[in-house]
């Protein structure tokens, strides 16, 4: 692949008790590109993302982010290293307002401590309007439904997905892991999400996504990894991988 | 050295009692996933009933204990029906159930205090004779505690492994959503669990009361012991609960031997911290947590 | 009668600090803790020992060179000690989640009580410490009930704004996010452990201040004022009033302080009344959890 990888995974293994869910997965994400992970339900895609982001401790294998090993690091540390993630089940902060959801991602991590919150009062008060504006502009770019000052829990499912995306974009991440960004979303929104992803990739952000929607994958992803039963079955340029008969059988025949 | 042996023997006897409590508590936590704080009050009902039967009505001690355990079991049943089941039907959160359970504990504790007073009550057990086993001396009461307690533990252990009903109850904790789907009577299982738990706790309570007496405020420190024993041994292993209880009691004996009896309560907490050190991920490992959120 | 009202006001002022401290941890952080009375007690004992020094305690004598610190310094010491105790507890307990976290705090509460009760060299164990000096603040000696009301009022107005500020600060926002969904918050780079520990520390420090105020108000402390019952009382007043905002805790405090006073007028024998009060708290907790888990005026219900 053309450019140097932003994220590499070597021989990752995860087992739940007796069941091996990932049996030695290796992959690399070229930086600034969109890579899709496809495969039948239960192939271990979500587990792979969990193991990368630190939500799950892999039994074996190495994950490195721009050459720096992050295997077994706590999720918040991984996030501070620049890896952002959107969960399959969305997970917005229900009781926070829509705009607060984004504001939280905008704050410097150091600014969230008690000390900074007390001593920096004038600071965060002064910065508040600016941050608020920035948060609002992210929400507008993504197109989350207004008003922004109601609890995020009240949003529709599709809008929650958009909000999760806005939150991610507002944070200072340069690698995104998106777990099924278009599942359960109307075709109009799917198109908008595709556009946002391309825009992010153009800004140099490396994106990995899990998808079951193949026209979407062909639309946005340069590279594809095909997973099956915890292994990488095939990988390469999107058209090539999706064109092969045996791959189509795994994906659609199952 | 003889003192140590004696303390170890005493510890083993106490350990059986702790194990009974741990099983009473653990059974509920394992299968109904309720953090049963009310247990701290519930297991004291039996000894008080035994006290009434024995001291007020002058019945023999074995009858008093039997009636006490039955009364405790009934109380456990009532607590499930009146307290936990309504919350369960509402799908209330764990913390809410725990707080309500704590409320029930406070109510039971103080009702007992109003009826029986705050001071220690002892049952009339006659003069205890004692037996020498080499360097060790055990009272008849201790021997009875040990034998009855072990019998109950063995019976429960066999039941959990062999009897279908108990196996199903054990499986309850793994997939609570699955049970009604499989057509199993979840509500009835829960009633059985809470009744049995209270009976086990009540038996332990009676055995404790026969030896050292009972006061309405002693419940919570025994509950701590029960819960820590269950944690130490592993939530999913019945034998672990028993071993955890015995281990705690032995450590308490060591504490008495090395320092002073007034610090025995600290053993429980030290073990709690120790469990954390040995299992740095906490009791519910990272993976379990991921699932639950 | 007038003094009685002033007494109630003082108690409300002290408990308001406890309620708002607990609110930070429970209402914002989503963590139910049963050891606030422990921090309160640590504060009360530290404050007392810093003031009386060697007169009452050999250990404190050696440690503190019979310091006889002035009141404000002692109060500051109480805050530090309360915060320190909270950190010690948090480091261990925060490795658990859910039921076992709550249980661990409950265990620590009982441990702190055992220590206070049995460590005679520290604070004379079960006998308690008598004759705690009345506060002297910059030359003003506080004796009268109304003076205590003023003192507590002044401390409250100095201390509570910090908490209110924290509720609305980025720190408070991150706590709420953790409360809503810990995994998602961590995926934004927020450390649950660090934020929760900070919240506990702040709550512990402020509870320590409340403890110092209490000790110098009643001038006699013993471990029974800082046991599990007290922690349960604090939890009930927060759950009753409701958490996650500013109005809930104060409503809970006022109701729970006045409720037993109402019982007093019914004229029950003293020992019986104490138990009956506890029974009422117990039922209140059960009914509250069943019908109104978010309390009278709360924004957050336990999950
Ligand atoms: N915590 C867990 N404990 C045990 N097994 C698990 C756990 N999490 C996932 N699994 C199993 O691992 C396998 C892979 O799950 P995973 O969620 O990674 O699949 P997926 O590829 O994301 O599927 P989908 O496309 O449906 O989202 C499944 O068989 C699942 O049952
Ligand atoms: Mg998945």
Image (tube, coloured by chain):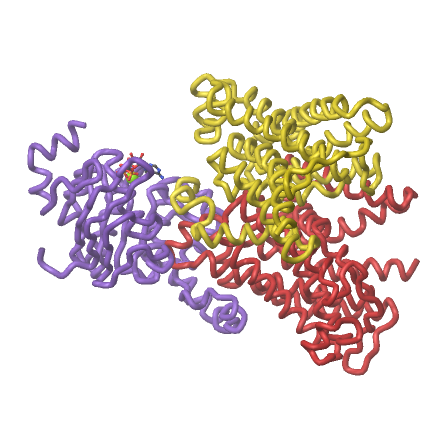
Chain colours: A purple, B yellow, C red
Residue C243 visible in the displayed image: no
Q: In this picture, is C118 found above or below B191?
A: below
Q: In this picture, is C287 found above or below C48?
A: above
Q: Position of residue B200 (x, y in %)?
A: 63, 29
Out of B9 and B221, give the one closest to the viewer.
B9
Locate the N terminus of chain A by quadrant: bottom left
Q: In this picture, is C73 found above or below A247?
A: below
Residue at point 43% right, 25% down? B178
Residue at point 44% right, 53% down? B280
Q: Position of residue B126 (x, y in %)?
A: 81, 31
Ligand 2 visible in quadrant: top left
In this rendering, the count of numbered labels is 0
Out of B3 and C24, give the one closest to the viewer.
B3
Out of B26 and C278, give the one closest to the viewer.
B26
Q: Position of residue C30 (x, y in %)?
A: 54, 50
Q: Residue furthest front?
A: B134
Q: Position of residue C288 (x, y in %)?
A: 67, 39
Out of C296 and B208, give the one closest to the viewer.
B208
- Find residue B27 and report its image quarter: top right
Q: Residue furthest top?
A: B183
Residue B236 visible in the displayed image: yes
Residue at point 7% right, 32% down? A245
Residue at point 34% right, 48% down? A56
> Left of A12 or right of it: where is B131?
right
Q: In this picture, is B20 found above or below A7?
A: above
> Left of B54 or right of it: where is C207?
left
Locate the C terminus of chain A by quadrant: top left
> Left of C88 or right of it: where is B127?
right
């Amino acid at each position: 692949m053309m450019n140097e990888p932003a994220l590499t995974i070597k021989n990752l293994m995860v087992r739940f008790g007796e069941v091996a869910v990932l049996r030695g997965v290796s992959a690399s994400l070229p930086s600034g590109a969109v890579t899709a992970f496809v495969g039948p339900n239960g192939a271990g895609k979500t587990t792979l993302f969990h193991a990368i982001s630190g939500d799950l401790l892999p039994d074996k294998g190495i994950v490195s982010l721009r050459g720096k090993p992050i295997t077994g690091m706590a999720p918040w540390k991984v996030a501070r290293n620049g890896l952002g993630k959107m969960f399959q089940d969305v997970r917005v902060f229900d009781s926070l307002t829509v705009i607060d959801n984004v504001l939280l991602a905008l704050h410097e991590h150091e600014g969230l401590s008690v000390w900074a919150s007390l001593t920096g009062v004038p600071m965060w008060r002064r910065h508040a309007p600016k941050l608020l504006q920035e948060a609002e502009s992210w929400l507008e770019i993504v197109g989350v439904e207004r008003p922004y000052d109601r609890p995020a829990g009240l949003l529709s499912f599709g809008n929650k997905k958009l909000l999760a995306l806005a939150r991610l974009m507002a944070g200072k991440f340069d690698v995104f892991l998106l777990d099924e960004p278009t599942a359960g979303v109307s075709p109009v929104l799917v198109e908008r999400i595709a556009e946002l992803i391309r825009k992010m990739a153009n800004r140099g952000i490396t994106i990995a996504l899990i998808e079951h929607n193949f026209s979407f994958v062909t639309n946005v992803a340069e590279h594809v990894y095909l997973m099956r039963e915890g292994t990488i079955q095939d990988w390469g340029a999107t058209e090539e991988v999706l064109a092969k008969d045996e791959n189509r059988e795994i994906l659609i025949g199952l | 050295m003889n003192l140590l042996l004696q303390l170890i023997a005493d510890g083993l006897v106490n350990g059986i009692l702790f194990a009974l409590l741990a099983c009473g508590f653990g059974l509920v936590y394992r299968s109904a996933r309720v953090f049963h704080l009310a247990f701290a009050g519930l297991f004291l009902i039996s000894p008080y009933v035994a006290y009434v039967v024995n001291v007020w009505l002058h019945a023999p001690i074995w009858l008093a204990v039997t009636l006490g355990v039955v009364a405790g079991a009934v109380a456990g049943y009532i607590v499930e029906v009146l307290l936990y089941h309504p919350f369960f039907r509402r799908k209330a959160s764990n913390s809410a159930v725990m707080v309500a359970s704590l409320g029930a504990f406070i109510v039971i504790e103080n009702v007992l205090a109003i009826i029986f007073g705050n001071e220690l009550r002892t049952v009339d057990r006659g003069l205890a004779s004692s037996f020498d086993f080499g360097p060790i001396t055990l009272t008849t009461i201790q021997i009875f505690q040990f034998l009855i307690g072990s019998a109950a533990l063995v019976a429960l252990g066999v039941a959990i492994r062999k009897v279908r009903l108990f196996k199903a109850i054990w499986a309850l904790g793994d997939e609570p959503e699955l049970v009604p789907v499989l057509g199993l009577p979840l509500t009835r299982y829960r009633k059985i669990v809470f009744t049995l738990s209270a009976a086990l706790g009540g038996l332990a309570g009676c055995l404790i009361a026969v030896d050292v007496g009972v006061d309405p405020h002693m419940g919570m420190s025994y509950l701590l012991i029960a819960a820590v024993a269950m944690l130490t041994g592993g939530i999913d292993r019945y034998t672990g609960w028993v071993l955890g209880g015995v281990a705690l009691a032995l450590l308490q004996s060591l504490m008495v031997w090395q320092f002073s009896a007034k610090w025995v309560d600290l053993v429980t907490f030290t073990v709690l911290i120790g469990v954390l050190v040995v299992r740095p991920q906490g009791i519910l490992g990272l993976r379990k947590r991921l699932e639950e959120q | 009668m007038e003094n009685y009202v002033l007494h109630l006001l003082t108690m409300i002022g002290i408990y308001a600090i406890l309620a708002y401290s607990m609110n930070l941890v429970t209402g914002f952080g989503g963590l139910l803790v049963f050891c606030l009375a422990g921090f309160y007690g640590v504060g009360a004992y530290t404050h007392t020992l810093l003031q009386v020094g060697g007169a009452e305690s050999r250990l404190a004598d050696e440690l503190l060179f019979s310091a006889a610190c002035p009141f404000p310094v002692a109060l500051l010491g109480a805050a530090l000690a309360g915060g320190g105790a909270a950190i010690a507890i948090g480091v261990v307990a925060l490795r658990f989640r859910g039921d076992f976290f709550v249980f661990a705090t409950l265990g620590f509460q009982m441990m702190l009580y055992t220590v206070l009760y049995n460590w005679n060299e520290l604070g004379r164990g079960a006998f308690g410490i008598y004759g705690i000096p009345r506060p002297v603040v910059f030359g003003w000696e506080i004796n009268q009930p109304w003076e205590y009301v003023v003192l507590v009022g002044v401390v409250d107005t100095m201390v509570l704004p910090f908490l209110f500020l924290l509720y609305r600060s980025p720190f408070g926002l991150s706590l709420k996010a953790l409360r809503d969904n810990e995994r998602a918050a961590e995926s934004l780079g927020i450390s649950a452990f660090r934020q929760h520990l900070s919240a506990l520390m702040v709550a512990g420090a402020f509870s320590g201040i409340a403890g110092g105020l209490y000790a110098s108000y009643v001038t006699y402390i013993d471990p029974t004022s800082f046991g599990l019952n007290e922690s349960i009382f604090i939890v009930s007043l927060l759950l009753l009033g409701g958490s996650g905002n500013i109005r809930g805790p104060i409503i809970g405090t006022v109701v729970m302080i006045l409720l037993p006073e109402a019982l007093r007028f019914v004229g029950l024998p003293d020992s019986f009344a104490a138990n009956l009060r506890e029974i009422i708290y117990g039922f209140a907790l059960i009914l509250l959890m069943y019908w109104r888990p978010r309390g009278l005026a709360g924004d957050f219900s336990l999950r």
